[in-house]
Image: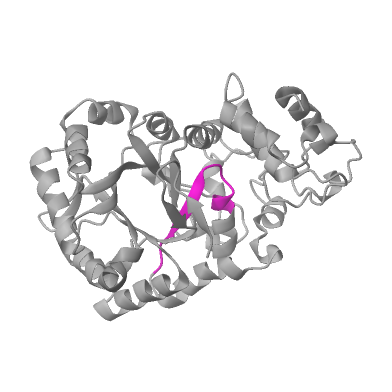
Amino acid sequence: MEYRALGNTGRKASVIGFGAEWIGELDQEAVNAMAARGAAAGMNIVDCWMADPAVRSALGEALAPTRGQWIIQGHIGSTWQDGQYVRTRDMALVRPAFDDLLARLRTDSVEFGMIHYVDEVGEFAAIMNGPFIEYVRELRDAGRIGHIGLSTHNPAVGLLAAREPEIELVMFSVNPAYDMQPANVDLDTLYGEYDALDAAGIDPARAAFYAECERTGTALTVMKAFAGGRLLSAEASPFGVALTPAQCIHYALTRPAAASVMVGVESVAQLEEALAFCDAAPADLDYASVLACAPKHAFGGQCTYCGHCAPCTVGINIALANKFYDLAEQHGEVPPSVQGHYEAMAVTAGACTGCVACEPRCPFGVPIAERMGKMAELFGC
């Protein structure tokens, strides 16, 4: 299992995390088996947004034997009212719901208190200037949460969160279909027919959000890496081809700042499919060739950091250099952190000879040599 830094928090998370979203229909034995298998595989992060008391209790029992191993993302603002889930900012409901979460998870505190499901800019402003954030600070100061996080599907909200020093982690929906779809706060659109996918590549708002997380040291954990399972089926996929769980996970983890993918699974067998990522051969992680040959909405001319261009004749890590270049391009001037990371590369773009040996290997037709020249000019080496 690989572990990645959760931004600037000082914590490290397994690249495969436990989404736990689909355990509501399972019996306790099955939930226990999934948590035990995850723990044995080295998984150490779990997300719990579910408000159903029975689900919370089931997860609490399952995590109890290895509680010290787990980083828990516990959501604030997810409540259970009249037998159903309700997202709310009513503090009279928020406070007891979070107390209930801790009690049912059998813990005095969680590592991340997640401001739950903020998908509108106006709502984000209201939260950050009202009693909700005051309560979250109260929880942090009392040690009931270790860090403040936020979940969103909207890159505009994510961008604001990444610029807010108090918010140290954002959980965001990441997969190639969503990345090619213009931002929309309507979740129904995210699960629609994807008619608005942009064949030119990643939506600029999403790219800017990823870049800002990297710049500010805001951790990024991933939800909906499989697009609700649609990407795993050629019939349902907007690309007209199916990806494997390992390919979806690999795609998400190539995004800047991405630390862990919260996989939503309903059985140990499905969890094993996700865990196969850890030992997969490069060919089995290759999402790029699949997307490049897709009959619909294929990426074109844009680097997705897949690494097919390697090896470079002079030793440049082309995919990494492209990632730093894209991060820098998102800002008016090159952030010092990005400049430092770029300069720390063993071989920078300035060493490019223009041989273009890499270009025929790129599935997306990226003009690599041309980009290397632009990188050398931008970074000065």
Q: Residue at x 83, y 47 (%)?
A: 312
Looking at the rendered image, the quarter that the C terminus falls into is top right
State the extent of the magenta-drawn residues as a range: 251-265
Q: Residue at x 71, y 64 (%)?
A: 283
Looking at the image, which is closer to me, 102 or 348? 348
> Does the segment drawn in magenta span residue 257?
yes
- Please say whether residue 257 is visible from this viewpoint: yes
Looking at the image, which is closer to me, 255 or 42? 42
Tell me the quarter of the picture where residue 43 sits. bottom left
Horizontally, residue 96 falls left or right of residue 107, namely left
Horizontally, residue 48 falls left or right of residue 353, namely left
Total labels: the figure holds 0
How far across and how far down the image is residue 148, in percent?
30, 41
- Please say whether residue 116 is visible from this viewpoint: no
Q: Residue at x 13, y 52 (%)?
A: 99
| Outermost bottom residue | 29
How far across and how far down the image is residue 236, in percent?
52, 59
Looking at the image, which is closer to me, 215 or 290? 215
Looking at the image, which is closer to me, 348 or 157? 348
How far across and how far down the image is residue 91, in percent?
11, 39
How far across and how far down the image is residue 263, in percent?
44, 61
Horizontally, residue 210 falls left or right of residue 105, namely right
Tell me the quarter of the picture where residue 67 sits. bottom left
| Outermost top residue | 332
Image height of 303 relative to 36, above or below: above
Q: Which color scheme did the rendering employ for the protein?
A: one colour
> Does the segment drawn in magenta span residue 79?
no
Image height of 24 relative to 318, above or below: below
